[in-house]
Image (tube, grey):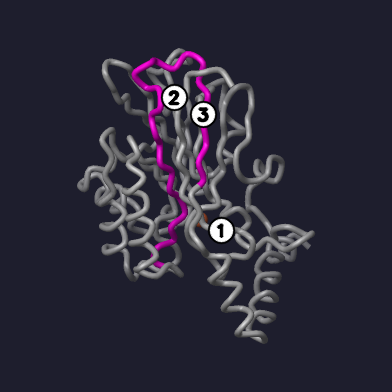
């Protein structure tokens, strides 16, 4: 019974695949429509944000799965649009590759080419962790100037004001340690946490970042009218839904991500680039 429950999302996905193959014209239209990039813009209110950090723009990209169903030109489009938004810093929350390591070097090189004045920060996802060479992802990112935060943090400075970027290892496949990720920071600091899987938030241990950026769920990827998604693969998002939520003053964002896994289709779930602007004014 437990196995059947575990396999249910795959069985449902296969049914969708079979159904789609019967109507190729409609399916092509549906694929194209569901796969248009969307830029999601959000204001994050931080009451005691230092004036020097007012208006700071954080770009969030996640779940590329760039070696599975993402065409090269789509990846280039994502990178071009991301850079054109002129973010102050870029946050990457995992699943860069996916099931097939075939294009690993090319895709990682392209993603690692992202640049922002205050830096590019990354954590790994479960799909990255599944790869036997996940340490190489860390090395290649770091060599290109991307800071990988595996249960670690970095303070960045703008005109003397400090912002703490925190990152945790993947909830399912890694060894997340939020105490280590928050080490040396406290609630008076402006703090942003990167976590691939929102289920990490069940063990925040009193650490209260101002903003948490997450991925993993793909927003369900296939969202049926009325019934919604097959699954989020995530208990936290089962409760809150994807997108923006708030808990005790912390803004939590679960992105629909950019790529696809298991099936090369998104239905009523457009891929997104997140752009978050920090704002010290009251709501
Ligand atoms: Fe993913």
Q: Name the residue under label 1.
A: 270
Q: Where is residue 220 in the image (x, y as percent from the top left)?
A: 63, 56
Q: Quadrant of residue 33?
A: bottom right
Which residue, given by chain and number where applicable, does mark 2 sit on?
A: 191
50 vs 202: above or below: above
Do the numbered discs 3 and 2 sit on residues whose CB atoms are within 8 Å? no
For marks 1 and 3, give the CA distance.
22 Å
- Between the residue at mark 3 and the residue at mark 2, the CA separation in whole angstroms equals 12 Å
Q: Is mark 1 within 8 Å of ligand 1?
A: no
- Residue picked out by circle 3: 44
Residue 161 part of the magenta segment:
no
Q: Earlier in the sequence, mark 3 or mark 2?
A: 3
The answer to whether mark 2 is within 8 Å of ligand 1 is: no
* Quarter-of-image position of residue 97: bottom left
Percent of width and height locating residue 24? 61, 85
Count of marks placed on residues: 3
Circle 3: element type: strand
User: Badge 3 local density, few (<14 within 10 Å), some, or many (20+)?
Assistant: many
Q: Give the range drawn in magenta.
A: 40-67
């Amino acid at each position: 019974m437990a196995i059947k429950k575990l396999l249910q999302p795959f069985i449902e996905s296969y049914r969708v695949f079979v159904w789609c193959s019967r109507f190729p014209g409609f399916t092509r239209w549906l694929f194209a429509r569901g796969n248009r990039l969307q830029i999601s813009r959000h204001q994050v209110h931080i009451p005691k944000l230092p004036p020097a950090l007012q208006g700071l723009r954080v770009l969030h990209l996640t779940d590329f799965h760039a070696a599975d169903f993402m065409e090269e030109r789509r990846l280039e489009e994502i990178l071009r649009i991301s850079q054109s938004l002129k973010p102050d810093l870029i946050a990457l929350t995992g699943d860069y590759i996916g099931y097939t390591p075939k294009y690993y070097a090319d895709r990682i090189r392209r993603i690692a080419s992202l640049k922002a004045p205050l830096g590019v920060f990354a954590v790994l996802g479960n799909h990255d962790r599944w790869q036997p060479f996940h340490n190489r992802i860390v090395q290649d990112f770091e060599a290109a100037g991307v800071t990988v935060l595996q249960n670690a943090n970095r303070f960045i400075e703008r005109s003397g004001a400090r912002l703490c970027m925190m990152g945790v290892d993947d909830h399912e496949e890694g060894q997340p340690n939020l105490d280590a990720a928050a080490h040396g920071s406290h609630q008076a600091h402006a703090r942003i946490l990167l976590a691939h899987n929102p289920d990490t938030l069940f063990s925040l241990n009193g650490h209260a970042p101002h903003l948490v950026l997450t991925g993993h769920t793909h927003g369900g990827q296939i969202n049926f009218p009325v019934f919604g998604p097959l699954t989020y693969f995530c208990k936290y998002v089962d409760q809150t839904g994807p997108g923006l939520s708030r808990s005790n003053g912390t803004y939590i964002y679960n992105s629909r991500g950019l790529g696809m896994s298991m099936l090369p289709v998104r239905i009523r779930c457009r891929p997104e680039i997140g752009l978050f602007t920090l704002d010290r004014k009251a709501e």
